Structures are given as structure tokens and as C-alpha cells.
Amino acid sequence: METLFLSPVLILTIAGILGLFMAWGIGANDVANAMGTSVGSKALTLKQAIIIAAIFEFLGAYLAGGEVTSTIRKGIVDPQIYTTDLNIFIIGMMSSLLAAGSWLYIASNKGWPVSTTHSIVGAIVGFVVITKGIDAVSWSKVGEIASSWITSPLIAGILAFFIYLSAQKLIINAKNQIAAAIFYIPFYSFFVTGIIAQVIARKGLSHIGLSWSDDEILVFTTLMALLAGGLTSLVLRLKKESISSKGGIEYAFGILMIVTACAMAFAHGSNDVANAIGPVAAIISVVNSNDLSSTAPINPAVLLLGGAGIVFGLATLGYKVIKTVGEKITKLTPSLGFSAEMAAASTVVFASYLGFPISTTHTLIGGVIGVGLANGAKNLDWSSVYRIFASWIITIPVGAVLTILFYVLLRVMFGV
């Protein structure tokens, strides 16, 4: 068996710090994307958005993040090719975390919304290419993930387009908007809560040692959805006078956006925590078993680390990207923002449920563009859209190049 270049405790400490750094970058960049529509539409203040994100990002990461994490950990490269190079593998995972985290810091500081999934996938590909060559990359898996970077914003965009049209037909264009809002908005709340409850019941409860039958899951999902729909209905009825006096129908949609913001935060945490802790989980697996054949489940403590880092990143630097997403693509109202968030949350949650890592950034931007088109293409700032697309294109090569640089640096530093 190969002797590790440092003590296991020291390796795990370094991996934990780098994972936390990467999770912080995700919070600063991607969570800002998730909450940008809520803040941009004035449905939530920045402080309120941070509090909601802190709670639901953490729950999503901890309760439903394990499935996607396993895809990132084992999908892009076959770990068995590093069976005789355990130290190289560990250095590579550390380099990938450091590279992706550094790029996210740069992008977040500039207010650029980039994909953390792009960042970590590009970083790991760069590591594999420099150590084992181009043929060692699981290009079919990379292709699957890359295809989602096209399909996920397209699906979210189409969903958002039709969700907004349905809201427009049922509520916005109704003769009595207030009555229509009080009647229909709880159904939207019911739907989005039901999606989240399904993921919690089927994926998340296993992390805390619970296993439910299909009938029990159906009961749990229905009760949670009914509770959310009932509470939404109650709040709308209690706030009926406020809706009439404080901006009308958009005020009512602002109440609904609190529900969709929770959904989007949960969806993001469940999907994107993998980008931070997938490599950490791989390092832990190597250190604990001294080989790469271990199939141990994700340690809940690692999910805890990822969730905490994401929340900290949003609180400290997230406001810059929130401004870009919430204000510069299209002028958002609560009804438009709700439609984009609901579509994006649904897409991301289903992807996480299937263990398919997609970009929350791409998905939400697709949703925002979808509602922008539903509201009239002239209302979209296409120059901002093109700049965002450009930042997506350069993220993968930047991640790969930074990984190669950090890989060389760490090998020299540790004498590996």
C-alpha cells in the first residue's frame, strides 16, 4: 500500500478547509443567482433573502445533496486509474478545489454569475488531462453533464414561459385580480412544496436513518403541500387589505415569492453542494481505506461542512452577483420573478433527484430569459445576456488551467 505524503489528520484538515473555501465560493456566486430574482423584484430585502437562503440552502445540502455528490465524486474520471497513485489523486482533488474556489472568488468579486458546476468539472478534467492524458477523462459523463448546460436552461425557460402565461391568464388578466390571486396562488404554493417534499422523503431521510414506504411518502408529501398551500391562502386572506393598498396583484405575488425563494434555495443546496464536497468525499474515501475502491456513503458531516460554507459565502459576498442577476437581465416584477424561480427550482430539484449535476446558474438564467420573452423580448437586456454567456464559456478552460498551476505548485510544496 502506498504511504500517504502527510498524516491522515493533516490531509483531512487541508481537504476540509479547501472544501469550505469552494463552498464559500458557491455561496458567493451561485446562491446569489438563486436569490437574485427575489431581491431584484423587491419581493425580499437582501437581509431577508440571506436568512431564507441560510435555512433552506443548508437543508437542501444536508438532506438531499448526497445523490449528486456521488456523481461528481465518481463520474468524471474512473478513480481506479489512480490505484497506484493515491497521493497524486489526493493532490489533484485538492488542486481542483483550490482552482474552482479561486475562480469563483474572482468572478463573485466582479459580480459575474458563473457556473460552479462548470468550474469544478473543468478543474477535475484539467487534473486528469495533466496526469493521465486526454483519453483518461470519462468524456461520455462529461458529455452528459455538458448536455444539461443546454437542456436545463431550455427546460427552465420553457417552464417559466408557460408558468407566467398561466399566471397571466388566471390572475393578472382576471376581472377581479385580488379574488383570483387569493384563489389560485395557493395552488402554485402547493405544487412547488410538493416537489421539495418528494425529494426530502425519497432522498434526504436516508441521511438521517429513516426509510419510508411509497404510501408514507405520499402522505408526507401531500400533508406538506397542503400545509404550504393552506398557509399561503391564510396569509393572502389576512393581507387582503394590504394587497389592495400596496401595489395590488404584484404584492400578492411577492408573498408567493417567499415560498418559491425557499424552494429555489433548497433546490440549489441539494444540487450544488456536490461541487464543493464531491472532491472532499473522494479524499476522505482514500484516506480512510487507503484505496479507491471504497463505496462508503457520503458522511453527513461533509454535507454539514458544505452547507455551512455555502451560507457563509452568500452572507459575505453574495450581494454583488445578486445585483447582476436581479437587475441587469430584465426588469423583474414579483410575478415574473416567481415564474422564473418556480421553473428553475422544479428543474434543479428533479435533476438532483436523478443524481444529475446541472448548473443552477444556467437554469435560473434560462428561467429569467423565459419570463422576459413571455413579457416581450424587447424587455430583455441582450448585451447582459451575451456577457453572461461569455463568462460561462471561459469558466471551464479557466478552471482547467488554474488546476494545472495549483497541481504543480502543491506537488512541489509537498514533495509528491
Image (cartoon, rainbow, N blue to C red):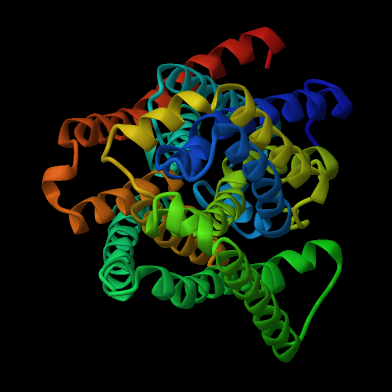
Q: Quadrant of residue 229?
A: bottom right
Quadrant, the N terminus: top right
Comparing 184 with 301, the one in front is 184
Q: In this view, does 286 lie above or below 317?
A: below
Residue 332 placement, left or right of 261: left
Q: Quadrant of residue 278?
A: top right
Q: Position of residue 261 (x, y in %)?
A: 54, 52
Quadrant, the C terminus: top right
Residue 32 placement, left or right of 388: right
Rendered residue at 55%/66% (across/down): 236
Q: Is residue 109 above or below residue 33?
A: above
Q: Position of residue 100 (x, y in %)?
A: 51, 27
Comparing 57 with 143, the one in front is 57
Farthest-out residue, bottom: 215
The answer to whether residue 409 is visible is yes
The answer to whether residue 83 is visible is no
Residue 151 placement, left or right of 88: left
Q: Where is residue 256 in the image (x, y as percent from the top left)?
A: 51, 60
Q: Quadrant of residue 180?
A: bottom left
Comparing 300 with 27, the one in front is 27
